[in-house]
Amino acid sequence: MKFTELGLAPEILRAIADQGYETPTPIQAQAIPIVIAGRDLMACAQTGTGKTAGFTLPLLNRLAAGRPAGATGPRKIRVLILTPTRELAAQVEESVRTYGAHLPVKSMVMFGGVGMNPQISALRHGIDILVATPGRLLDHAQQRNVDLSAVEVLVLDEADRMLDMGFIHDIKRVITLLPKKRQNLLFSATFSEEIKALATGLLNQPEYVEAARKNVTAELVRQKVYKVDRERKRDLLVDLIRDNNWYQVLVFTRTKWGANGLADKLLKAGIEADAIHGNKSQNARTRALANFKSGKLHVLVATDIAARGIDIDELPYVVNYELPNVAEDYVHRIGRTGRAGSEGEAISLVCVDERKLLHDIERLIKRQIEETIYPGYEPDPSIRAEPILMRSSAGRGGARPQGGGRSGGAPRPGGAPSGNRSGPAKPGGASHRSGSRNR
Ligand code: AMP
C-alpha cells in the first residue's frame, strides 16, 4: 500500500513526502479510507502506531476540498479534536500544521494554564481545526467565545485516558454543543467496557479498526522474567543496571509512591534516575523526560498512566519493576522497546505475589516468558504470597486497597480518577477531578 493509493490531495502527499514517510502504517492504511468516506470510526491504537496521521491526513483532505458551498465571512470550526492533556493537544496540532503545510487551513491549539485572551483573539480570526482539552473548551463555550455550530467532525483522541482522568462529563457537555449530524472518530489504546459504552452513545454505525498489536508477536522484544523476593527487587534492579551497564531504562511501577521511592533508591545507589507520575508538576515531568531523552538521566521510573501518550519509544530496555494489574498494560509497556527494527529487552521482576498476574499476561500474549534467577537473588521458598496492595513498593508507606484496572474495574463515582490512574497534575499538585482539572 502506498500513500498515493489512499485518495489524498496532492498538497497532503507533498507534506507526507516532506516528512520522508514512504508507506502508511497499518492503522493509517485502514483508517484513512474510512474517514475519507465520511464514516464513523472506532480505532484501537496506541501512541507510536501513527494514529495521529491516521485521522489528521483524511481530515485535512476534507478541508482541502474547500469551504462548504455558500460559506462566507470568517472561517468556522469544522473539525474539533479533543485530547486529554496539554502535551497531546500540542503534539496533535503540530501534526496538523506539519501535514497541512501546503494547504490554506487554519488550526489552533487550546488548553488551560495559559491566558484566555490570546485564545479569544485567535478564535475571532477564524479557525478550521481546533485541538483542545475539554475543560478549557468548555470555559470558552460558557463565555460564548467559541462557536461550535459548524463542526462537521469530532475526534476523541486517547479517549480511554480522558475517561481515566474523569473527563466523561465534560465530553458529554461538549457533544451537546455540536451539530447532531456529524462524523465521529474515537481513538483509544484500550477497548474497555467504559470505552464501549462511550462508543455506543457517540458513534453511528461505526467501522472498527485495530492497529496490529505488534508487540504481542514482536520478535524484536526479548522478554524475560527474573524471579525475585518482593523485598529484594530494589537491590536486584540496582545490580542489573550496574552489572549490565544499562543506560536508558524505563522502569514501571504500579503506584506513584512506588515510583518516587524507587527513583530515590536508585539515586542513592549513584544511578541517575527520576520519576514521572500524576503528582509531578508539568514542568518537572517535561524536564525529566527531556533529561531522559538526552541521556542525562539513565533511568526514568513511571506509572502506566504517566508513560502513556508521551513520546518515548525505541528504548533498549523496559523494566517491569512490578507487573501491571491489567495484563494489557504489559503490552503497552513493552511496546516502548524494540521498535523500528531496533532490538529491545523487556525485563520483569516477579515476586511470589505476582504469579497470577504473570499467568494472565502469558495468556494474553499467548506465549510463555522465559524465567530465570539472577545469581545471588534466589527466591526464598518459605515466603508466602501476599495480596497485592496499591502501596509504596517494598511495603512502606500507607497501604491502600488495590483499585480496579482500567478495563475491568468498577466505575468510579463521578468518573474521578482513582489511585495511580490519576492524570498529570496541575502545576501546584492538584490532581484532575471534575472541578480541578487541566484548564
Ligand atoms: P503517533 O502514533 O501518531 O504518535 O505517531 C508515532 C510516530 O510515527 C510519529 O513520530 C510520526 O511522525 C511517525 N509516523 C507517522 N506516520 C508514519 C509513517 N507512515 N511512516 C513513518 N513514520 C510515521
Image: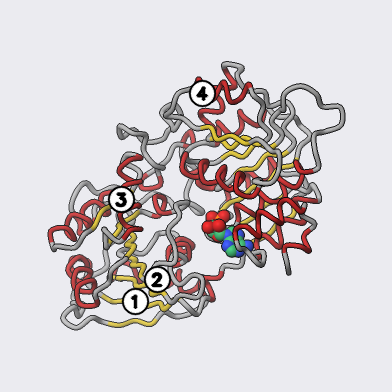
- Whole-angstrom CA distance, mark 1 to mark 4, is 52 Å
Asked if the residue at tag 4 contacts the one at tag 1, i.e. Cβ–Cβ closer than 8 Å, the answer is: no
User: Going from the N terminus, do you reach mark 2 or mark 4 first?
Assistant: 4
Residue located at (66% from left, 50% from top)? 55
Asked if the residue at tag 2 contacts the one at tag 3, i.e. Cβ–Cβ closer than 8 Å, the answer is: no
Residue at numbered disc 2: 358
User: Is the residue marked 2 within 8 Å of ligand 1, measured from its CB?
Assistant: no
Residue located at (40% from left, 67% from top)? 315
Which quadrant of the figure has residue 171? top right
Foreground label between 3 and 1: 3
Horizontal and vertical percent position of residue 348: 34, 71
Horizontal and vertical percent position of residue 23: 66, 67
* Residue 46 in sight in this render: no
User: Going from the N terminus, do you reach mark 3 or mark 2 first?
Assistant: 3
Ligand 1 is found in the corner quadrant, namely: bottom right
Question: Quick one: label 1, few (<14), some, or many (20+) residues within 10 Å?
Answer: many
Residue at numbered disc 3: 288
Asked if the residue at tag 2 contacts the one at tag 1, i.e. Cβ–Cβ closer than 8 Å, the answer is: yes
Residue at numbered disc 4: 118
Position of 347 relative to 411 (above/below): below
User: Going from the N terminus, do you reach mark 1 or mark 4 first?
Assistant: 4
Residue located at (62% from left, 39% from top)? 81
